Image (cartoon, rainbow, N blue to C red):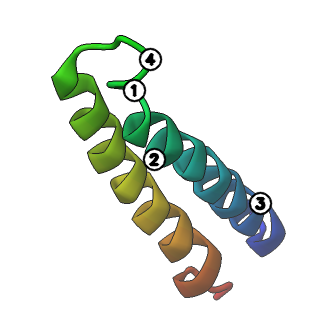
Amino acid sequence: MSESSIKMIGLACMMLSIFAILFGAHAAEAGAPAYLGSVLVAVGLIVLLVGTILYVVVKKD
């Protein structure tokens, strides 16, 4: 995979993670079970970390 495509995947992960974190923060107000908000925030943070690593750290050899 080229460096550009890895960076694009990293950016997509970061964008999706923001939506997961925002939805997780407001899931209880929407009537979702209480644990769902915590799970979505945790998954969003992990995906944000992975996206950041893909975007910044992965370099072309």
Are dots 1 and 4 in contact, CB under 8 Å? yes
Type of residue at label 4?
Answer: Ala
Q: Which residue is drawn at 56% across and 80% down?
A: 58
Residue pointed to by mark 3: 8
Does residue 24 lie above or below 32 as drawn? below
Q: What element carries label 2?
A: helix
Are dots 3 and 2 in contact, CB under 8 Å? no
Are dots 2 and 1 in contact, CB under 8 Å? no
Which quarter of the figure is the N terminus placed in?
bottom right
Residue pointed to by mark 4: 30
Q: Which residue lies furthest to the front in this view?
A: 29
Work out whether mark 3 precedes mark 2 in sequence or the reverse, and give the earlier one: 3
Image location (x, y in percent) of residue 3: 75, 74
Q: Choose mark 4 or mark 2, whichever is in front.
A: 4
**10 Å crowding of disc 2: few (<14), some (14-19), many (20+):** many
Residue pointed to by mark 1: 27
